Amino acid sequence: MWTRDQAGSGLLEKTNTPTFRANISEGRKIMAESKKDMLVMWLRDAYSMEKQAIDMLQSHAGRLENYPELKARTEQHLGQTRVQADRVQDCLSRLGADTSTIKELTARFTAGVQAVMGTTAGDEVVKNAMGDYTFEHFEISSYRCLIATAEEVGEPEIARILGQNLREEEEQAAWLADHLPQVTRQYLQKLEAAGGDTSSAKR
Ligand SMILES: [Fe+2]
Ligand SMILES: [Fe+2]
């Protein structure tokens, strides 16, 4: 069995060489680069996510006719989302990366949500609101991970910028949480008033 001195002196001999010190230094550099690569990769996913959000919110707001409060709020968040995409692009530029070859991760996520929700149904206002609420939480989780990563790689300005996006997603999720019951009740009342005809109630 090794004593502490034996182990210590052996280790000291092995580690006190220029080659070992160079390897340690190179290893740290690779780790740091790898963390930053993850930040870039996840920022690109977030950019794709926001682009997808723009398409989705545009489509949802454009179809609403009889829910003025929900329409106004959706349009307001659409405006915020365009700014959010620009902020993510700004973060990528700060890291010397761009958005030219973004993969379509979020397209698959949104397609999955839409498949579950069935957006062409006679209850689309409720299903779209549920989908939007779900999507806000996807965005919240993305920004929470991104902010932790930015802090971990020593990019406080990027963490601060992403914090603005996170706050807006949380505010939108909270608004939707408050208003989902109201939207649902309005839909049911319109449906009843129209004798079960979904054409005006559904949007
Ligand atoms: Fe967003
Ligand atoms: Fe959002």
Image (tube, grey):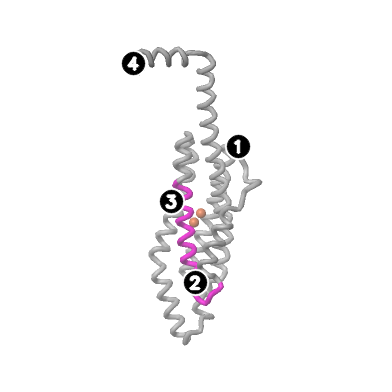
Q: Label 2 near label 1: C-beta < 8 Å?
A: no
Q: Main secondary structure of the magenta part?
A: helix
Residue 18: image x %, image y %?
53, 14
- Seen from the viewer's position, the closer of residues 179 and 15 is 15
Residue 10 image offset from top left, x and y in percent:
42, 14
Q: CA distance from mark 4 to mark 1?
A: 50 Å
Give whichever of discs 2 and 4 has the lower sequence position: 4
Provide residue 178's location: percent of width, then percent of height: 38, 64
Task: Give the mark nearer the N terminus: 4 vs 1.
Answer: 4
Residue occupied by mark 3 = 167
| View extreme (left): residue | 3
- Crowding around mark 2 (Cα neighbors within 10 Å: few <14, some 14 to 19, many 20+) is many
* Magenta span: 120-144
Residue labelled 1 has its Cβ within 8 Å of some atom of ligand 1: no
Which residue appears at 58% of the width and 57% of the height? 107
Residue drawn at the location 40% of the way across and 71% of the way down:
182
- The amino acid pointed to by label 4 is Thr
Mark 4 and mark 3 residues within 8 Å of each other at the beta carbon:
no
Query: According to the image, label 1 marks what residue?
Result: 96
| Residue for badge 4 | 3
Residue wearing tag 2: 125
Nearest the camera: 78 or 181? Answer: 181
Secondary structure, mark 2, is: helix
Whether disc 4's CB lies below 8 Å from ligand 1 is answered no
Q: From mark 4 to mark 3, how far is it between C-alphas?
A: 55 Å
What residue type is disc 2 on?
Answer: Val
Q: Earlier in the sequence, mark 1 or mark 2?
A: 1
Callout 2–callout 4 Cβ contact below 8 Å: no
Depth check, mark 2 against mark 4: the one in front is: 4
